[in-house]
């Protein structure tokens, strides 16, 4: 199964709502983590994630690799990473 690594940034809208940036596709987990760290300097929130893609182009639920700053609540809940 192909693996899709991505980074999603968030910024604040005029009324304070979180707005999504266009997701950025990267080649591997290390690149996703680096890109998330860089984007976190200019965005209010960023997530790095990985998804599997099957033969029918169906995507698995994302597995979150990193979360920085403020992200939508449903992502923050799903991305809980115990330390």
Image (spheres, grey):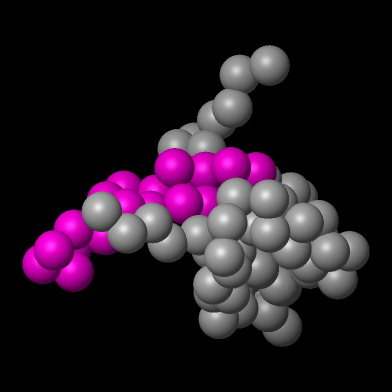
Task: State the extent of the magenta-drawn residues as a range.
Answer: 45-66
Q: Please tell me whether residue 11 is drawn above or below residue 78 in the rendered image.
A: below
Which residue appears at 13% of the width and 63% of the height? 55
Which residue appears at 46% of the width and 51% of the height? 50
Q: Please tell me whether residue 25 is drawn above or below residue 76 in the rendered image.
A: below
Q: Is residue 36 left or right of residue 75?
A: right
Residue 23 position, x and y percent, is 54, 74
Quick check: can you spot residue 62? yes
Q: Nearer the viewer, residue 28 or 75?
A: 28
Q: Please tell me whether residue 1 is drawn above or below residue 15 in the rendered image.
A: above
In the rendered image, residue 1 lying in the magenta stretch gets the answer no
Q: Is residue 42 left or right of residue 6?
A: right
Quick check: can you spot residue 71? no
Which residue appears at 68% of the width and 59% of the height? 31
* Quadrant in the picture for residue 16: bottom right
Residue 58 position, x and y percent, is 18, 63
Q: Nearer the viewer, residue 56 or 10?
A: 56
**Picture quarter with the C terminus:** top right
Residue 64 position, x and y percent, is 52, 43
Which residue is at the far top? 83
Which residue is at the far left? 56
Query: How many numbered callouts?
Result: 0
* Quadrant in the picture for residue 2: bottom left
In the rendered image, residue 58 lying in the magenta stretch gets the answer yes
**Picture quarter with the N terminus:** bottom left
Which residue appears at 57% of the width and 65% of the height? 27
Q: Nearer the viewer, residue 8 or 12?
A: 8
């Amino acid at each position: 199964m192909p693996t899709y690594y991505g980074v999603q940034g968030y910024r604040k809208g005029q009324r304070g709502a979180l707005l999504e940036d266009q997701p950025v596709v990267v080649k591997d987990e290390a690149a996703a983590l680096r890109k998330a760290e860089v984007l976190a300097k200019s965005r209010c929130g960023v997530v790095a994630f990985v998804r599997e893609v099957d033969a029918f182009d169906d995507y698995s639920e994302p597995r979150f690799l990193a979360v920085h700053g403020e992200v939508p609540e449903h992502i923050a809940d799903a991305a809980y990473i115990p330390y």
